[in-house]
Image (spheres, grey):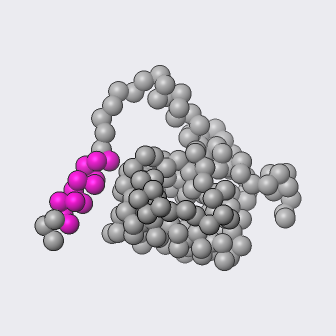
Amino acid sequence: MVLAALLFIRRVADTTTVTAVTDEYVRDGHVHSLQHHELPPYVRIFRIHGPFLFGATDKLRVVVHDVSSLPEIVVLRLRNMTALDATGLRAIEELADLLHRSGRDLILCGARHQPSEPDRARRFSPPRRRRQHLREHSRRARTRAPPARRAGQRA
């Protein structure tokens, strides 16, 4: 139990950084900004802010509370997710499966270095149908829909 607590503390501490804000940092952040951008009606964005570990996975219920009211594309913005463990990864996989069964797509965007590490550690390879739903930032996630949907048509 003590070892588990120490490992948890280390994992959270590893996600904490203190760095200078540079011009490059500001420029790189523009593609992640949602300000001054309208969301298409077929897209809803949710975000995870902070560590998404075993004790926090039930917070995804805000997404699945009323699946029938969600649009065709659901984006899970991970830019401010500071840590991810296997339980958090499994919860995201289950969300993707649920949305897929309901005819919706889940797009993940903005994951930082540490949250993507468990993917590599588990050799996580999403099914081919999901691989296309990983995006570097929210601008690419918002424009991922097929051209017919971007034009306002239903497929």
Considering only vertical position in the picture, is 107 above or below 57? above
Q: Residue at x 53, y 32 (%)?
A: 28
Q: Main secondary structure of the magenta part?
A: helix
Residue 33 in sight here: yes
- Give the side of residue 53 with respect to residue 128, left or right: left
- Residue 124 lies, in percent from the top left, at 50, 62
Residue placed most toward the observer, 142 or 89? 89
| Residue ranking furthest to the front | 123
- Residue 82 lies, in percent from the top left, at 38, 51
Considering only vertical position in the picture, is 38 above or below 101? above
| Residue ranking furthest to the top | 23
Residue 44 in sight here: no
- Residue 11 lies, in percent from the top left, at 28, 54
- Give the side of residue 51 with respect to residue 36, left or right: left
Which residue range is magenta in the image?
Answer: 4-15
Looking at the rendering, in which quadrant would you find the N terminus? bottom left
Magenta run includes residue 22: no
- Give the side of residue 9 with respect to residue 59, left or right: left
Q: Residue at x 32, y 47 (%)?
A: 15
Residue placed most toward the observer, 133 or 150? 133
| Residue ranking furthest to the left | 2
- Residue 75 lies, in percent from the top left, at 60, 57
Quarter holding residue 21: top left
Magenta run includes residue 5: yes
Q: Residue at x 49, y 49 (%)?
A: 111
Looking at the rendering, in which quadrant would you find the C terminus? bottom right
Give the total number of marks visible in the rendering: 0
Quarter holding residue 118: bottom left
